[in-house]
Image (cartoon, helix red, strand yellow):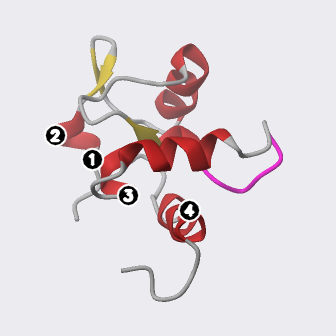
Amino acid sequence: MTDGRPRAELVLERVRAIPEGFVRSYGDLSPGAPRFTGTVLSRLPPDGDDVPWHRVVRADGSLAKGARQRALLEAEGVPFRGERVDMRAARLPE
């Protein structure tokens, strides 16, 4: 249910609501359509937006944007297990 607003706007609102030190998965932000979240985020300006895109990761904790994303998450204290975010510790509860 989108409450009349465009779906993309709702996704961006949900991304902005992720607090520092936590992550959500693409599917958390657009249940049933995780690729839609990816499409919305891919259309953001490279550095000129207030959307913390780096806090959105794949459901298994892997990163879509590699080293840059990891550096931003580590700076916020997001825990990792190897190459992946420790989703048990860092995933924002529903």
Are circles 3 and 2 on residues that touch, CB within 8 Å? no
Q: Nearer the viewer, mark 3 or mark 4?
A: 3
Q: Which residue shows up at 27% across the image and 54% down it?
A: 32
Q: Earlier in the sequence, mark 3 or mark 4?
A: 4
* Mark 4 closeness class: few <14, some 14–19, many ≥20 residues within 10 Å: some
Residue 40 x, y percent position in the rendering:
59, 50
Compared to residue 29, the image places residue 52 above or below, namely above
Q: Position of residue 17 (x, y in %)?
A: 49, 66
Quarter the C terminus occupies: bottom left
Q: Amino acid at mark 1?
A: Arg
Stretch of the chain drawn in magenta: 47-52
Residue 39 sits above or below residue 32 on the image:
above
Of the two numbered discs 4 and 2 on the same chain, state the one appearing first in sequence. Answer: 4
Q: Residue placed at 50% from the left, 62% from the top?
A: 11
- Mark sitting earlier along the chain (4/1): 4
Asked if marks 1 and 2 touch (Cβ < 8 Å), the reply is yes
Q: Which residue is mark 3?
A: 30
Question: What residue is drawn where x is 55% and y is 69%?
Answer: 13
Q: Secondary structure at mark 2?
A: helix
